[in-house]
Amino acid sequence: MKRKVTKAVFPVAGLGTRFLPATKSVPKEVLTLVDRPLIQYAIDEARAAGITDFIFVTAKGKSALEDYFDHATDLEAKLEADGKHDLVEALRSSNMESGSIAYIRQHRALGLGHAVGCARRLIGDEPFAVILPDDVIAAEKPCLQQMVEAYAETGGSMVAAMEVSPARASSYGVLDIEDDMGSMVSVKGMVEKPKPGTAPSNLAVIGRYILAPTVLANLDQIVPSAGGELQLTDAIAMEIEQGRGVYGYRFRGERFDCGSKAGFLQATVAFGLAREELREEFQSYLHEIVAMRKAAQ
Ligand code: G1P
């Protein structure tokens, strides 16, 4: 079954403990890469892929994230009156159409599978996307758009995939590959956070998914696994057992793990350098600091 994908789920209920104390009062999805919060990158990617309905699975303490999607009409009017058109543009680019956003509360932190399952009534019986905003992907063609195009050929369910070193495989969902067709692989199994040395391949799941609605029914069947949590990976793996197609898509682009401090800093450097108005000053600072470090060694 292939159908147009118009709904995306954003699981954003996590506590963001790795970024404490910042995340005491600021949800991690609102932390800023250059001048835009992480969630804005995810939204822009979803929009580019044709998503029109945005479902956020939130939790207690995330009101700043919900507020981020309010329209700042007074501020827009003031900036307009002051002739600050570029800032008006920046503000407007973050505006969402009224009625396009829904918030669902995840009442207990039972895992990614549970979080996605919380959105089932809003998804209904159609394929849907899932975007994990911690995974920020810099790409000429946005990752989810690449996947939507590939999905038009395959149907089924599809996860973004990336090669990782064997030592890192146990931090991810890992694919058991049936057939490797280059940018696409067909999958015969998936393991969430395999024990060191047991990963079926080095191809890891990255936080972009296009899922058949049958995955939602599977979410009712799964039991806690890796980390004692209900894992989305397990519900997708059930699709394979049920005879439906599951594919891994090797996207073109660079992925940053913004759920970790090191990844967030790397993304800040990469996205800073990608901005024309910052590039020269930032680049010469980076050269300087590297040269100074070398000299001091
Ligand atoms: C989640 C998924 C995992 C995937 C990863 C990608 O894990 O459960 O399968 O590989 O995202 O970032 P988490 O990083 O939330 O532990």
Image (cartoon, rainbow, N blue to C red):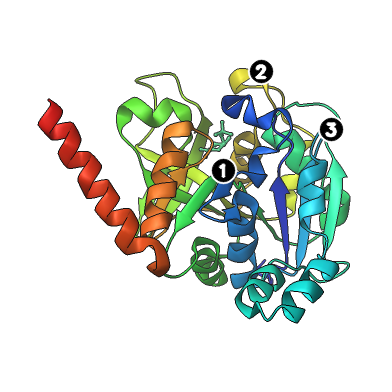
On screen, residue 126 versus residue 293, left or right, reads: right
**Closer to the camera: disc 1 or disc 2?**
1
Mark 1 or mark 3: whose residue is earlier in sequence: 3
Q: Residues within 10 Å of mark 3 (few under 14, many from 20)?
A: few
**Closer to the camera: disc 3 or disc 2?**
3
Q: Position of residue 268 (x, y in %)?
A: 44, 48
Q: Amino acid at mark 3?
A: Lys
Q: Amino acid at mark 2?
A: Gly
Quadrant housing the N terminus: bottom right
Residue 248 appears anywhere in the view:
no
Could you say whether the residue bearing mark 3 is in a helix, strand or loop?
Answer: loop
Picture residue at 28% right of the left edge, 55% below the top: 283
Q: Which residue is mark 2?
A: 228
Q: Which residue is mark 1?
A: 134
Quadrant housing the C terminus: top left
Could you say whether the residue bearing mark 2 is in a helix, strand or loop?
Answer: helix
Could you say whether the residue bearing mark 1 is in a helix, strand or loop?
Answer: loop
Q: Mark 1 and ligand 1: say if the CB distance to the nearest ligand atom is below 8 Å.
A: yes
Q: Position of residue 18 (x, y in %)?
A: 57, 26
Q: Position of residue 225 (x, y in %)?
A: 63, 22
Q: Which residue is mark 3?
A: 60
Front residue of 107 and 291: 291
Residue 108 appears anywhere in the view:
yes
